[in-house]
Amino acid sequence: ENDVLAKLPLKNKKILITAGPTYEAIDPVRFIGNHSSGKMGFEIAKAAAQLGAEVILISGPTNQTVSHSLITVIPVTSAEDMYHAVHNHFSNCDVAILSAAVADYKPKEVAPQKIKKNSSTLSLELEKTKDILASIGAIKTHQFLVGFALETNNELENAKDKLKRKNLNLIVLNSLNDAGAGFKSDTNKVTFIDANNVVTEFQLKSKADVAKDLLNKITEQINA
Ligand code: CTP
Ligand code: CA
């Protein structure tokens, strides 16, 4: 086998990745957001490009940057924006990895003007956002679909349930119980669960190394 090709096992594969938080507008100057840094998703994009894949990286607001000829970044703001960007690109991809921390709820109405502090309490009515991952799980044909699960309790059970419910091929369980893992950190501790219920637990490591483990697992599975 040719050495150069062996190092680029994902050459000619198209991979869609979501990253970062979403911002849900309250009024023209305020939003509901979360602490996702986007690091994990950007590391996954870099690891995929290093293996030769063509990457579409759909990212919510983040300070992360990347410059690679195989990576196209599509910046979005809200869950609704991300939903449309993902659906624009999904049919054309071979693998989709949804690592974004998408808001589960958004203000039902966005105030057209800045809300003034003229009452002692303020209630915002929230409604669910669209579940992007579940929506592509429901329409996938040949795509290998990877989701993330952030859990604090009944972790394995909840992650397995998400894998089934959203029609995934693989889920990455991210435990917030582990010191050094999570949103803002440079390290992460993950467990992979595949569609055959094979559970692989990893040690705490850099997000760059977690990304490499993930791409190795995906490469193995799509070539199986
Ligand atoms: N996800 C998504 N669209 C949403 C919410 C979540 O695509 N509106 C994706 C995330 O990117 C992640 C997976 O779904 O890959 C699981 O996200 P998580 O927050 O762990 O689970 P939820 O399904 O949102 O359920 P809950 O927050 O109640 O645990
Ligand atoms: Ca959620």
Image (tube, grey):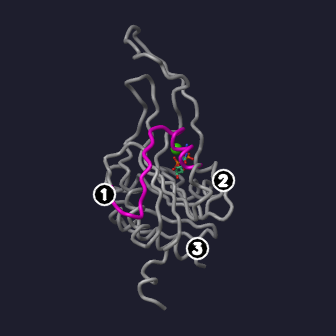
Q: Could you say whether the residue bearing mark 2 is in a helix, strand or loop?
A: helix
* Residue nearer the viewer, 7 or 161: 7
Give the number of the mark in front: 3 or 1. 3
Residue type for callout 2 = Arg
Residue 136 sits above or below residue 80 on the image: below
Q: Give the mark, 2 or 1, whose residue is nearer the N terminus.
A: 2
Give the number of the mark in front: 3 or 2. 3
Q: Give the mark, 3 or 1, whose residue is nearer the N terminus.
A: 1
Residue type for callout 1 = Asp
Q: Which residue is identified by label 3?
A: 222
C-beta proximity under 8 Å, tags 3 and 2: no
Q: Could you say whether the residue bearing mark 3 is in a helix, strand or loop?
A: helix
* Picture quadrant of residue 122: top left
- Residue at image location 41% in from the left, 67% down from the top: 49
Q: Which residue is identified by label 1?
A: 186
Residue 14 rendering spot, x and y as whole percentages: 53, 64
C-beta proximity under 8 Å, tags 3 and 1: no
Residue type for callout 3 = Ile
C-beta proximity under 8 Å, tags 2 and 1: no
Residue 132 sits above or below residue 223 on the image: above
For disc 3, the neighbor class at 10 Å (few under 14, some 14 to 19, many from 20) is few
Magenta stretch: residue 82 in it?
Answer: yes
Query: What's drawn in magenta, residue-wise?
Result: 66-87
Magenta stretch: residue 52 in it?
Answer: no
Q: Which residue is identified by label 2?
A: 165
Residue 125 rendering spot, x and y as whole percentages: 54, 23
- Residue at image location 35% in from the left, 45% down from the top: 62
* Residue nearer the viewer, 197 or 111: 111
